[in-house]
């Protein structure tokens, strides 16, 4: 049984169909990637998987249980956490407080406990702080940065803090939206190794949107490809790299035909894109 499964998932905004009847499944313990040219509908699909958007039609299943239409906070409590393409931290809160925000979803203290403050509340708060500090060490920030304001961290450290906040929710499934965006090659390589470490040490399932093909091909067990709101291919990195429809989506029809017939320029371009050494062609932004 897949950990998460989307069945005929569709999202319309008025007359615009941003995602069209997508079937998708992710197996427990795997790292999967969702790729496609800009405007393919990847972020819209991600937003449906985390409850930010309610699908127009279709069903979403978590461990065989339907979760279509539940609120984002319920998604979190059920074990789905995410980061965002554009970093969304609480800038004027400390690094530690940002992680504690994520930890709040696992606290049991209710209104009465908050008002009366019995010893159990203090104990739970201490445990939450210890867990948050442990996660800061795990992501490489360390306790020394716990009291710094989040806005004062470097870009790469802000990315790691956002991951720490997501991990504080104790997810079964971690969704990462372009985690290496804006990073230099060294930062990208470090974060790629770290994502492997998250899966291996915390035994999590990971799904990421990523434009860096070197990261995608190097980290993924499975890759799914979207174009114009539809899923056009799925398979291992090697299978996706050789798929004619994927090549056409990234290179265009003329270059794809040239590639099929052995055109040297198209061959070189496809190899560069799939290896992450050549930039992807830009189109319109993903549907909001």
Image: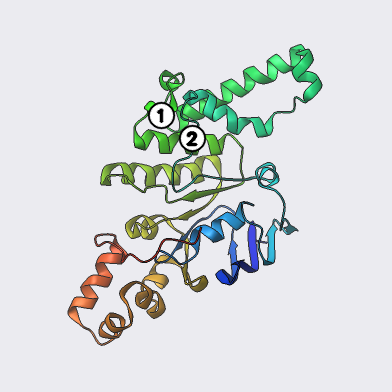
- Circle 1 SS class: helix
Residue 66, image quadrant:
bottom right
Q: Residue extending furthest left?
A: 264
Q: In the image, residue 41 lies at what x, y percent?
A: 50, 64
**Residue 20 relative to residue 200: left or right:** right
Q: Is residue 32 above or below residue 262?
A: above
Where is the N terminus found, in terms of image quarters? Answer: bottom right
- Identify which residue is drawn at 75% across, 13% down: 117
Pick whichever, 164 or 286, lies toward us: 286
Residues at marks 2 and 1 touching, judged by CB atoms closer than 8 Å: yes
**Mark 2 Cα-neighbour bin, 10 Å: few <14, some 14–19, many ≥20:** many
Q: In the image, residue 248 lies at what x, y percent?
A: 36, 78
Q: Is residue 199 above or below residue 127?
A: below
Give the colour scheme shown: rainbow
Q: In the image, residue 125 lies at what x, y percent?
A: 65, 19
Of pointers 2 and 1, the one earlier in the residue sequence: 2
Mark 1, residue position: 151
- Circle 2 SS class: loop
- Identify which residue is drawn at 31% across, 81% down: 256
Q: Is residue 24 above or below residue 49?
A: below
Pick whichever, 272 or 92, lies toward us: 92
Mark 2, residue position: 89
**Residue 166 relative to residue 262: left or right:** right
- Identify which residue is drawn at 55% across, 61% down: 45
Pick whichever, 2 or 174, lies toward us: 174
Q: In the image, residue 63 lies at what x, y percent?
A: 70, 56
**Mark 1 Cα-neighbour bin, 10 Å: few <14, some 14–19, many ≥20:** some
Alpha carbons under labels 2 and 1: distance apart? 8 Å
Q: Residue extending furthest right?
A: 112
């Amino acid at each position: 049984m897949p950990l998460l499964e989307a069945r005929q998932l569709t999202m319309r905004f008025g007359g615009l169909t941003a995602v069209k009847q997508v079937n998708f499944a992710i197996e427990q313990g795997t790292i999967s990637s969702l790729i496609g040219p800009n405007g393919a509908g990847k972020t819209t699909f991600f937003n449906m998987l985390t409850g930010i958007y309610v699908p127009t039609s279709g069903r979403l299943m978590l461990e065989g249980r339907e979760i279509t239409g539940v609120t984002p906070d319920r998604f979190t409590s059920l074990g789905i956490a995410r980061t965002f393409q554009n970093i969304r931290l609480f800038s004027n809160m400390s690094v530690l407080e940002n992680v504690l925000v994520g930890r709040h979803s696992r606290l049991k203290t209710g209104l009465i406990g908050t008002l009366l403050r019995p010893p159990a509340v203090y104990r739970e708060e201490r445990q939450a702080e210890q867990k948050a500090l442990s996660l800061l060490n795990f992501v490489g920030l360390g306790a020394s940065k716990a009291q710094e304001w989040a806005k004062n961290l470097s870009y790469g450290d802000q990315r790691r803090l956002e991951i720490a906040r997501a991990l504080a929710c104790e997810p079964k499934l971690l969704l990462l939206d372009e985690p290496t965006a804006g990073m230099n090659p060294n930062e990208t390589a470090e974060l790629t190794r770290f994502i492997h470490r998250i899966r291996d040490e915390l035994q999590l399932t990971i799904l990421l949107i990523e434009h860096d093909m070197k990261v995608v091909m190097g980290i993924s067990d499975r890759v799914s490809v979207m174009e114009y709101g539809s899923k056009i291919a799925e398979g291992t990195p090697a299978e996706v790299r050789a798929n004619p429809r994927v090549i056409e989506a990234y290179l265009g029809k003329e270059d794809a035909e040239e590639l099929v017939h052995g055109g040297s320029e198209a061959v070189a371009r496809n190899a560069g894109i799939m290896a992450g050494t050549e930039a992807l062609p830009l189109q319109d932004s993903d549907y909001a």
